[in-house]
Amino acid sequence: MNRSINFFISIFFIFLISFFLIRLAPGDPVLLMLGDRGNDPAQYRIMMESLGLNYPLYEQLKMYILNIFKGNFGNSIVSGKSIIVELLPRWKASFELGLIVFIFSFFIGSILGIYLAYKFNSKVERILSSSMLVVYCIPIFWLGLLLINIFSLKFNLFPVSGRIGYEFDLISYTGFYLIDSLIGDNYKNYSFTAFFSCLNHMVLPIITMSIVPIVSIAKITKVSILEVLRKDYILTAKSLGMSESSIFFKHVLRNILVPVLTISSLYLINVTVAGAILTETIFSWPGIGRFLVTSVLSRDYPVIQVVILFIGVFILIVNLILEMLVKIIDPKQRVKV
Amino acid sequence: MINKKHVFIFPFVLLGISCFFLDPYTQNIDKVLLQPGLTNGFSYIFGTDYIGRSYLDRLILGGINTIGLALIIVFTSSIFGFFLGCYAAIRKGTIESFIMRFSDILMSIPGILLAIVIVAIFGNGVIELFIALVIVLIPRFIRFSHSITSRINTELYITIAKVTGSSKIQILKNEILPNSKNLLMQQSILSFSEVILEISALGFLGLGIPAPLPEWGAMLAESRNYFSTNPYLIILPGLCLMLVVLFLNYIGENLTINKREKNAIKN
């Protein structure tokens, strides 16, 4: 109950932020959009009405929220197209990349963490841990530039930018290129080449985006395993003669699964969204992060509004779903005290 | 706290003093994209950038800009965040839940996204960047000090202090502050490194410290096109950034924290 009230307050807050975005900007928002000099008063009035600025503030807020629930997000100033039409393909591009990074870094990170915990205090562990600290401190935009220059320009292994090679002209079924390239006419025309081109374009962005989450998740996993290994029931299991592997699967894994899953998934969402903004800019990935940056640079306020709204609500919804999932997985939370 | 091992901060202080003799703005058209080396004199030891400005001077001043701004940001937000968090934990009731809920909501948005939004509202500039990152950081400090304070608040010595008639401000000054200052220090240093990364990430996106002022992220962005011919243009600023962040993380993780404080953070 408390949870859902919190959720709706947060959603409302995100609405407020995106609503006040135009209104808080210094100067006249209409002039900001039309340009400062030589304005036609008639055009000024039209613009004002199209933005709804001639109504009182609470009316504007009401209209804004109603419009959003009707699916009317307004038009971009730069391109003049409907924002939702521009947003959806970019959203899918980001989602495709983000989901793969999410899964990839979760698995690699937790496996690395388990390895480090079982090798604790050995030479390998110390070297790996200290090199992980170094890796964690690499700024990801710098890492992206270095990767492009080493692997794309020097060795010509991976492409520099984009989602797919220019020679492929995919018909969009779902908007996710990895799926699109395997179904329907696309598969008939290109067989697996389009799919591999797609994967090839993804390698560098995935590495760039997942390096920080991998290190953090490995750390979380390592610490929580070490904590569990010190518990009395592990000692009991050992004295009963259980093998290392069955102790691991029956006791350690079950006990660390929930905390690691909660912390790392909540953390991963934030890191993936933040990483997407930088990574997409570097690799010219046509996603929502790059869309946000370009529209901030060109002061395209309606687009910024909608993008913030989308990302904010998305994060909140995912957080809510994850919390509910954890409640289902974790037996400790099923019984209400 | 910081011990004798960290004396190697002094070269950096010397670098800081040297900023009065540096010149990051003069453009020498005849010295565009000089390779690093000693042949052109000491001030061109790291070569020049694409319009012939000394890269050494820009690197040093870029570092001072970034680190200085980050220091002010962390200082401001840790003080405000600490007092708001303590206030919430001591006062309890609606004020507490209001402050905590507000910081929860702000924390659910990724830091860099929030900063970009604020920069988008107020425009580019040092003060705007300052406001943006303070808003990003404050909720973290609020939550942090709130959790520490409400933990300490249940300890016996707080009860004793209350019984002996200490006021709330006295309790804050004599009990809570001494018991949480090392943890606060550690949190500040770790956030310091994060803020440095965020300032340079925003600079890289073109939303950070405005153009003629040198800044590592912006330097990376403006020399992207010269990488294949002049790799030092990219390698040097990134390396500086990484070393500073690494150094701060190293100090932050090796601060000595006593057992009671460790228990406070664990729960």
Image (spheres, coloured by chain):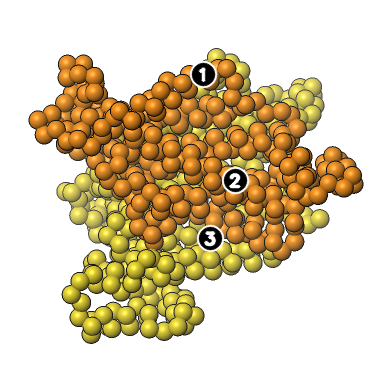
Chain colours: A yellow, B orange
Rounded to the nearest whole Å, what is the CA distance between mark 2 and mark 1? 26 Å
For residue A162, side relative to residue A317 (left or right): left
Q: State the image coordinates of residue A327 (x, y, percent, origin top left).
A: 67, 53
For residue B202, side relative to residue A258 (left or right): left
Per the image, label 3 sits on a secondary structure element best described as: helix
Q: Quadrant of the N terminus of chain B?
A: top right
Q: Quadrant of the C terminus of chain B?
A: top right
Per the image, label 1 sits on a secondary structure element best described as: helix
Mark 1 — residue? B7
* Chain at numbered mark 3: A
Q: State the image coordinates of residue A136 (x, y, percent, origin top left).
A: 46, 32
Quarter-wise, where is residue A197 in the image? top left
Say which mark, if any, is on residue B65.
none
Say which mark, if any, is on residue B79.
2
Rounded to the nearest whole Å, what is the CA distance between mark 3 and mark 1? 48 Å
Q: State the image coordinates of residue B228 (x, y, percent, origin top left).
A: 19, 31
Mark 3 — residue? A317
Q: Are marks 3 and 2 in contact (CB under 8 Å)?
A: no
Quarter-wise, where is residue A50 in the image? bottom left
Tell me if residue A177 can be seen: no
For residue A335, side relative to residue A165 (left or right): right
